[in-house]
Image (tube, helix red, strand yellow):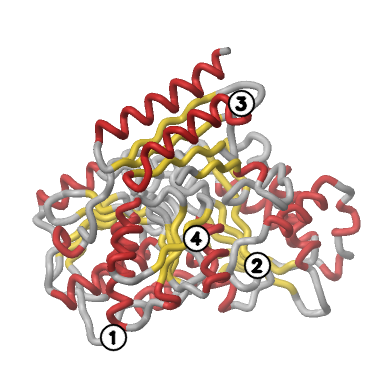
């Protein structure tokens, strides 16, 4: 079935200017990723969450970008001026900030990171007291406060917040991650290569794997403020794949800059994406009676092979818009405890509230240990259908509004039938139409993709 989606204009969704699908993001030291905006964000978010007579608290973490040293004190000043106590935890994965926000009974959590982007970019993600990313409505309310007069957010001198550093924050996350690995199992005898992308998990991820018994080979664990995600991590797994085969490792784990997503490499150096990880965990949890709702949640980008695999096992698949926050929301709606994205965001709500690349990798390792199978066998749960994605930039009115384009899309979708899938959506952050086609045969896929892209491009040029 063809899915026409425009993430900017979802029915009933509030319009946000600063916040995107995953917080605020942009070039460091340029609006909105400058110190002035961060200061106002701290004041506005502090005002929004300052409810009741208790001492209010925010947890602030970051990845390893140099610009984090600019944004962290600006945010701290904003929160302190709004009467919020600040707990600084330094470089830690995004899921650790969500966990600490809840365990420390904080009113909100902040992660300073641009995820898999290069060091020139940075971003700010906000979590509520439940450890969940804020809703569209909450983000809109904070934006409205930022646009107005924030004088009312500033407390009297005696009510200013205080800033402190939590020294044992990494240890808390390490123990939580280890607790997600089944009791009675060990990683002894396994050689694992872990690529931390010179990012937020550069200390904690190798430590967790080593303490669980593995022989650990670490890559991307020497951050210098500029090298985060540079030729390493989940978006550049080539070095990891080569090292896995060279060192005869059992598995390679590639995290991104803030460690909320993961891709794997089997012992033969072959990539294992988020869809295969979801399939493996779903099958394992279903056998154990742990898969809630007998289904999982994935986005519209997940391969049809995953959907067919789950159906053959009597399991369901709930699809949602692109973005792990939408996956998380649908998981809560459906009662599912497993969800994620093809890109490697995997949310396991039994253990956390947001994507956690390390914990997801541990669930895969548990299966390898329990079933005594190599990753090349255990992690190939289904055959993927050929899938291609093309981005078409436009100016002015979206070509998707054209009746002729709609007609061609409908005709191609009908011709594909059950042998494929068409997904066409407008980007939520730039004037781009994303055209994705899946088909059982590569030749048929190319025919459909050429037809659709040619039609859309003809309208763009016109």
Element on which disc 3 rests: loop
Q: Nearest the camera: 451 or 160?
A: 451
Total tally of numbered discs in the picture: 4
Q: Taking 40 as reference, is 302 left or right? A: left
Element on which disc 2 rests: loop
Q: Nearest the camera: 246 or 203?
A: 246
Q: Position of residue 334 (x, y in %)?
A: 53, 71
Q: Which residue is mark 2?
A: 128
Residue sitting at x 29%, y 33%: 444
Marks 2 and 3: in contact by CB < 8 Å?
no
Nearer the N terminus, badge 3 or badge 2? 2
Q: Nearer the viewer, mark 3 or mark 2?
A: 3
- From mark 3 to mark 4, how far is it between C-alphas? 41 Å
Residue sitting at x 56%, y 71%: 332
Question: Compared with residue 13, is residue 90 higher up or lower down, i.e. above or below?
Answer: below
Q: Would you say residue 340 is visible in this rendering?
A: yes
Q: Position of residue 149 (x, y in %)?
A: 89, 49
Nearer the N terminus, badge 1 or badge 2? 2
- From mark 4 to mark 2, how far is it between C-alphas? 13 Å
Q: Nearer the viewer, mark 4 or mark 2?
A: 2
Q: Which residue is mark 1?
A: 183
Quadrant into which the C terminus falls: top right
Mark 4 crowd level (few <14, some 14–19, many ≥20, 10 Å Cα): many
Q: Position of residue 208 (x, y in %)?
A: 31, 70
Q: Position of residue 67 (x, y in %)?
A: 55, 43
Mark 3 crowd level (few <14, some 14–19, many ≥20, 10 Å Cα): few
- From mark 3 to mark 2, how far is it between C-alphas? 41 Å
- From mark 1 to mark 2, how far is it between C-alphas? 31 Å
Q: Which residue is mark 3?
A: 402
Nearer the N terminus, badge 3 or badge 4? 4
């Amino acid at each position: 079935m063809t899915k026409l989606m425009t993430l900017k204009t979802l029915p009933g969704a509030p319009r946000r200017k600063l916040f995107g699908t995953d917080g605020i993001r942009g070039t460091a030291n340029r609006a909105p990723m400058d110190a002035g905006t961060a200061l106002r964000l701290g004041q506005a978010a502090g005002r929004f969450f300052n409810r009741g007579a208790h001492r209010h608290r925010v947890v602030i973490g970051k990845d390893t970008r140099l610009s984090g040293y600019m944004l962290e004190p600006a945010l701290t000043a904003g929160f302190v001026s709004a009467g919020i106590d600040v707990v600084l935890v330094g470089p830690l994965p995004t899921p650790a900030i969500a966990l600490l926000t809840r365990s420390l009974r904080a009113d909100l959590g902040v992660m300073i990171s641009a995820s898999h982007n290069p060091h020139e970019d940075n971003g700010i993600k906000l979590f509520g007291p439940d450890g969940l990313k804020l809703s569209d409505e909450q983000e809109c309310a904070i934006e409205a406060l930022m646009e107005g007069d924030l004088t009312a957010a500033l407390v009297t001198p005696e009510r200013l917040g205080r800033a402190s550093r939590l020294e044992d924050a990494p240890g808390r996350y390490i123990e939580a991650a280890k607790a997600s690995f089944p009791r009675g199992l060990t990683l002894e005898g396994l050689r694992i290569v872990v690529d931390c992308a010179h990012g937020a998990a550069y200390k904690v991820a190798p430590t967790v794997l080593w303490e669980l018994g593995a022989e650990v080979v670490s890559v991307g664990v020497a951050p210098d403020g500029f090298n985060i995600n540079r030729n390493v991590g989940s978006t550049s797994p080539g070095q990891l794949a080569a090292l896995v085969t060279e060192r005869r490792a059992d598995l390679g784990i590639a995290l991104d800059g803030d460690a909320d997503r993961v891709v794997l490499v089997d012992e033969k150096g072959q990539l294992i994406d988020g869809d295969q990880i979801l399939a493996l965990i779903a099958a394992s949890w279903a056998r154990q009676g742990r898969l809630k709702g007998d289904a999982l949640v994935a986005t519209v980008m997940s391969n049809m092979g995953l959907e067919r695999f789950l159906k053959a096992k009597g399991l369901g698949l709930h699809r949602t818009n692109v973005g792990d926050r939408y996956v998380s929301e649908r998981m809560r709606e459906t009662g599912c405890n497993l969800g994620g994205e093809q890109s490697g965001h995997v949310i396991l709500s039994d253990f956390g509230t947001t994507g956690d690349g390390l914990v997801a990798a541990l669930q895969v390792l548990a299966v390898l240990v329990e079933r005594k199978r190599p990753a090349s066998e255990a992690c190939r749960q289904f055959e993927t259908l050929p899938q291609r994605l093309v981005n078409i930039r436009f100016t002015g009115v979206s070509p998707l509004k054209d009746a002729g384009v709609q007609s061609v899309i409908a005709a191609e979708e009908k011709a594909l039938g059950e042998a494929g899938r068409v997904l066409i959506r407008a980007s939520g952050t730039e004037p781009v139409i994303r055209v994705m086609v899946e088909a059982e045969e590569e030749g048929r896929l190319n025919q459909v993709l050429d037809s659709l892209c040619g039609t859309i491009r003809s309208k763009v040029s016109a």
